[in-house]
Image (cartoon, helix red, strand yellow):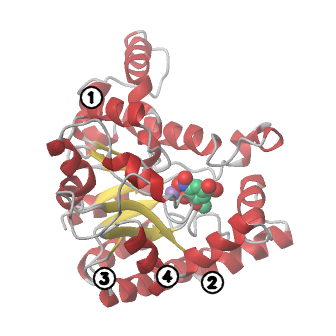
């Protein structure tokens, strides 16, 4: 151990963790039912068939920690020096549920439970609204309720919804509500739809180990290349896991996207107002969830700008005190570190 982890800013910054998960019992029960009755897709069987049923220490501990929005979570934050957690319903939220009324009910009650927890710990917990994109108009209304009545500071959507992507016209009410409330959209990974799964489960690569990033970066890129930021120039999209590797690939995606557009290779791809570098530096925010890795964080800072890179722990999926110490010891300037841990979160979530 190199140094103690305390809350309260003894290193010159507060630590705000921006991709922290919780669950409600009824959501886990709905996942279990889908796994049992055969309506879950391969990704759900792999992910929630494991976490909700495995007797392993990892699975049982994670379920226990997801369900706690009280003392244990606060104690774990205290023990790792996390001043504030920005909380969102765990992945894939209610998005795989086939009964839309059930999905909306579970999302609404999860939002209410989260709002209660935030009210009980106003200096420690901040909430993001969960939605059910299966019903875009309802989701838009829930985003407005989250912003105005529940005090939430952003919206999280767990990538695709039963194979549907947010660039589809039907989801426009969600972007309208984000624009009207001035809130950011956190696009969190989800299990892969069957159409993308291929041999990933056999290879053991479908989850957070790899598949999540493939599917989520695909989703993020679809949104950019079909012009979401030309329609909504002020929209901010946050993504975890090193912005799902987009900064690493940026030169190539930009070059090949523009080459394809110029040669009119794809009917759907039209010229954008800006190159992809512009959107990466004006509309994307990236967190280090799952990637407390100095080269990746420095790359994000260089490519996206130091105002756009934020700390996240990804509790309870990743709860490793030494990772917080590694982030304290990042070889970036003190001013950049304060932005990374504290002030970028305050700025973009409007805390
Ligand atoms: C895992 C990782 C699961 C992340 C998650 O939600 C999740 C995992 C179900 O390790 O299986 O949010 N993550 O963001 O890295
Ligand atoms: Mn996560």
Kindly identify the residue that appears in the image at 27 percent across and 83 percent down: 122
Above or below, 342 against 222 in this view is: below
Q: Report helix, strand or loop for mark 3.
A: loop
Mark 1 vs mark 4: give the one in front: 4
Return the residue at label 4.
Answer: 72
Instruction: Give residue 18's position: percent from left, percent from top.
Output: 36, 60
Above or below, 339 against 351 in this view is: above
Return the residue at label 3.
Answer: 150
Q: Are marks 4 and 3 in contact (CB under 8 Å)?
A: no
Closer to the chain start, of discs 2 and 3, is 2
Residue 295 visible in rendering: yes
Return the residue at label 1.
Answer: 302
Mark 4 vs mark 3: give the one in front: 4
Mark 1 vs mark 3: give the one in front: 1
Q: Report helix, strand or loop for mark 4.
A: helix
State how far apart marks 4 and 3 are (Cα). 23 Å
Instruction: Give residue 32's position: percent from left, percent from top.
Output: 76, 74
Q: Nearer the viewer, residue 297 or 253?
A: 297
Q: Which mark is residue 35?
A: none
Return the residue at label 2.
Answer: 25
Closer to the chain start, of discs 1 and 3, is 3
Q: Quadrant of residue 271?
A: top left
């Amino acid at each position: 151990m190199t140094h103690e982890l305390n809350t309260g800013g003894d290193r010159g910054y507060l630590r705000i963790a921006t991709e922290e998960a919780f669950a409600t019992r009824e959501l886990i029960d709905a996942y279990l039912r889908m796994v049992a009755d055969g309506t879950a897709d391969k990704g759900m069987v792999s992910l929630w068939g494991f976490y909700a049923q495995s007797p392993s220490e990892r699975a049982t501990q994670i379920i226990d920690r997801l369900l706690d929005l009280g003392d244990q979570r606060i104690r774990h934050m205290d023990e790792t020096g996390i001043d504030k957690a920005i909380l969102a319903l765990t992945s894939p939220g209610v998005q795989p549920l086939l009964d839309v009324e059930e999905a909306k009910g579970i999302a609404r009650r999860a939002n209410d439970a989260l709002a209660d927890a935030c009210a009980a710990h106003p200096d420690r917990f901040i909430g993001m609204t969960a939605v059910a994109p299966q019903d875009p108009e309802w989701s838009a209304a829930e985003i407005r309720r989250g912003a105005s009545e529940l005090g939430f500071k952003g919206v999280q959507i767990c990538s695709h919804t039963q194979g549907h992507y947010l660039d589809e016209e039907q989801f426009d009410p969600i972007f309208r509500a984000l624009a009207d409330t001035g809130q950011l959209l956190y696009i969190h990974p989800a299990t892969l739809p069957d159409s993308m799964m291929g041999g990933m489960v056999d290879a053991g690569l479908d989850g957070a180990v790899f598949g999540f990033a493939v599917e989520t970066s695909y989703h993020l890129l679809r949104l950019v290349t079909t012009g979401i930021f030309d329609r909504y120039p002020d929209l901010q999209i946050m993504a975890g896991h090193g912005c799902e590797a987009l900064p690493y690939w940026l030169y190539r995606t930009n070059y090949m996207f523009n080459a394809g557009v110029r040669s009119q290779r794809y009917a759907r791809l039209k010229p954008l107002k800006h190159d992809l570098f512009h959107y990466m530096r004006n509309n994307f925010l990236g967190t280090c969830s799952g990637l407390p890795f100095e080269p990746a964080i420095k790359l994000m800072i260089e490519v996206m700008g130091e105002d756009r890179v934020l700390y996240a722990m990804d509790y309870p999926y990743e709860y490793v005190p030494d990772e917080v110490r590694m982030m304290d010891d990042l070889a970036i300037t003190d001013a950049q570190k304060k932005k990374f841990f504290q002030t970028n979160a305050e700025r973009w979530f409007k805390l």
